[in-house]
Image: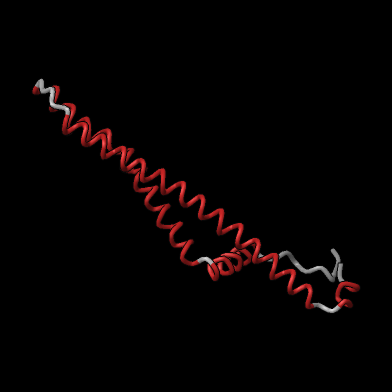
Amino acid sequence: MNPKMSRPADPVAVLKRVIRYMLHYYKAPFALVVLCILINAGASVLAATFPQTLVDDYIMPMIASGSTDFSGLAAQILRLVVIMALGVVAAFSYNRIMVSISQGTMCRLRNDLFHNMEALPIKYFDTHA
């Protein structure tokens, strides 16, 4: 190994540094991403447990009584549709916001790197690969 070459940076330290850099410019959008992820996760959990509630609270009592009144069942299915739509909107939103955050961070990082390289003396480029 070449003695002038340094050890590779610790990946965890590099990740922390990049996250700090990103949060410096994108605190509010990142907080919105976290909120959208929580909404999406909540909607997914509710959607997974909802069929049991429908069967236990609406379908089985209707079968037992022979009722043909579907208004309660229809209202609960509509509620499920709204919850699922909210989850889909939240998932779409956090994906779009994260694209903006990642592309913006990369652009800022490249610009900062370019400005730092412009400030270096020509001799630096003669002595470093």
Q: Quadrant of the C terminus?
A: bottom right
- Numbered-mark total: 0
Q: Residue pushed farthest top?
A: 66
Which quadrant would residue 53 be assigned to in this image?
A: top left
Q: Nearer the viewer, residue 17 or 25?
A: 25
102 with respect to 93 (left or right): right
Q: Residue pushed farthest right?
A: 126
125 with respect to 75 (left or right): right
Q: Nearer the viewer, residue 89 or 125?
A: 89
Q: Position of residue 11 (x, y in %)?
A: 64, 62
Q: Quadrant of the N terminus?
A: bottom right
Q: Position of residue 70 (x, y in %)?
A: 17, 27
Which quadrant would residue 2 be assigned to in this image?
A: bottom right
Q: Nearer the viewer, residue 123 or 69?
A: 69
119 with respect to 98 (left or right): right
Residue 43 vs 36, above or below: the answer is: above
Q: Position of residue 21 (x, y in %)?
A: 59, 69
Q: Position of residue 65 (x, y in %)?
A: 8, 23
Q: Residue at x 41, y 49 (%)?
A: 90
Q: How is the image coloured?
A: secondary structure
Q: Residue at x 50, y 50 (%)?
A: 95
Q: Residue at x 39, y 53 (%)?
A: 38
